[in-house]
Amino acid sequence: MSAKLKQVLSVLIPALVLIGFIWAAFQFSPQEIIDTLGSRNVYLALFIVGLFSTISTFTSAPFYAALAVAIVGGLDPITVALVVAPAVAIGDIIFYVLVSKASHALAHKYERLERIQSWLRQRSLPTIQVIIWAFFGFVPFSTDIFLSLISLTGAKPRDILMYILLGNFTFFFLLGYLVEQGSPWIEKLIG
C-alpha cells in the first residue's frame, strides 16, 4: 500500500465513521443508536475516532457531535471522558512530537516566536504543566497552535502527557455533563 493511499485512508475511514454516526443521529434517536450498536461498540468507536479527531478541524467537529449523540443516548459522561481522553491525548502527543521538530527551527527565523519562546522558557515546568491542563480542560478551541507554542519550551512529551490527559478528561467530562444536563433540549433538536 502506497504512502499516499495510507494517508488518504487514515483521514477517510474516521471521517466516514463520523459521517455514518451523524447520519444515524438524524435517522434514529440517540437511544436507538446506543441500543442497536451496544454501548461497548460505541465506546470503542469513540476511542478510535478520538485518535483521529486531532488531525484537523474537519474531523474534530463531527467528533464532538458524535460525543453528544452518545451521551444523549444514555452513555455515562464520566466513562465517555475516561475512554475518549486517552485517545485524544495520544493524538495530541503525536502532534506535539512532530511539531517540536519544526518549531525550534522556526523560532529563530521569526522575532515574535523568539520572544514567545523566551517568555515560555522563563516559566517553570510545573507552571507550564498547569497552563497545559487549564488550556486543555477549559478552552474549547483547537490545541494545535497552543501545542506548537508549548513545544518552544523544549518540554519533553513525558513531562506534559499527564497534563494533556488530565486536561482532556476535564474537558470531555464537562462537555459530557453539560450535554447530559441539556439532553432533553438536544434530543428534541436531533430526535
Image: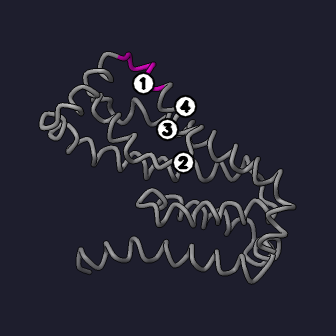
Q: Which residues are magenta?
A: 123-129
The CA distance from mark 1 to mark 4 is 10 Å
Q: Residues within 10 Å of mark 2 (few under 14, many from 20)?
A: many
Q: Earlier in the sequence, mark 2 or mark 4?
A: 2
Residue in the foreground of this view, choosing between 8 and 37 = 8
Q: Is residue 32 magenta?
A: no
Q: Residues within 10 Å of mark 4 (few under 14, many from 20)?
A: some
The CA distance from mark 3 to mark 1 is 11 Å
Q: List the residue tagged with mark 1.
A: 128
Mark 2 or 1, which is nearer the eye?
Answer: 1
Which residue is painted at 49% across and 34% down in the image? 162
Mark 3 or 1, which is nearer the eye?
Answer: 1
Q: Earlier in the sequence, mark 4 or mark 3?
A: 4
Q: Amino acid at mark 2?
A: Pro
Residue 97 image offset from top left, x and y in percent? 30, 44
Under circle 2, the secondary element is helix
Above or below residue 47? Residue 172 is above
Q: Amino acid at mark 4?
A: Ala
Residue 36's image quarter?
bottom right
11 with respect to 190 (left or right):
left
Q: Residues within 10 Å of mark 1 (few under 14, many from 20)?
A: many
Q: Amino acid at mark 3?
A: Ile
Q: Earlier in the sequence, mark 3 or mark 1?
A: 1
Q: List the residue tagged with mark 3.
A: 164
Q: List the residue tagged with mark 4.
A: 134
Q: List the residue tagged with mark 2.
A: 86
Count the numbered circles shown.
4
